[in-house]
Amino acid sequence: MFQNKIAYWAEQKGIKYSYLAKKCGVSNQTLSRWVNNKTQPDLKQAFILARALGIKVDELGELEI
């Protein structure tokens, strides 16, 4: 699932959620909602998130768009 990919890549890259939220231009609460599968980023946010994680957007998994 999508949220597991955020957690997985953040852990693999040693990136803290607070840093990731800042790089994505979202609040810690928004990032938490993504990680906990309460919401998903839109397509633009997904590309920003992937860039912040240093991965390709398709490595985040399937997005419901």
Image: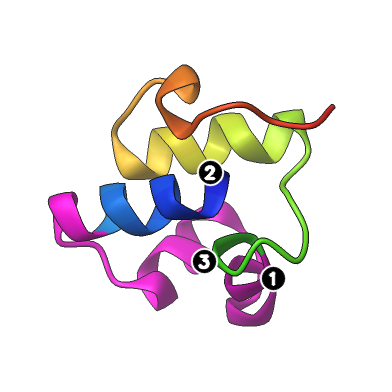
Instruction: Tell me the residue that label 3 is attached to.
Output: 21
**Residue 14, x across and y down, in percent:** 15, 61
Tag 2 or tag 3, which sits nearer the N-term?
2
Residue displayed at 69% across by 70% down: 30
Q: Amino acid at mark 1?
A: Thr
On screen, residue 43 above or below 32: above
- Closer to the camera in the image, 35 or 52: 35
Q: Are marks 1 and 2 in contact (CB under 8 Å)?
A: no
Instruction: Tell me the residue that label 2 is attached to.
Output: 1
Q: CA distance from mark 3 to mark 2?
A: 19 Å
- Identify the mark at residue 30; answer none if there is no mark: 1
* Quadrant including the C terminus: top right
**Residue 11, x across and y down, in percent:** 21, 60
Tag 2 or tag 1, which sits nearer the N-term?
2
Q: Amino acid at mark 3?
A: Ala
Residue displayed at 51% across by 66% down: 21
Q: Amino acid at mark 2?
A: Met
Q: Are marks 1 and 3 in contact (CB under 8 Å)?
A: yes
Tell whether 12 sits left or right of 37: left
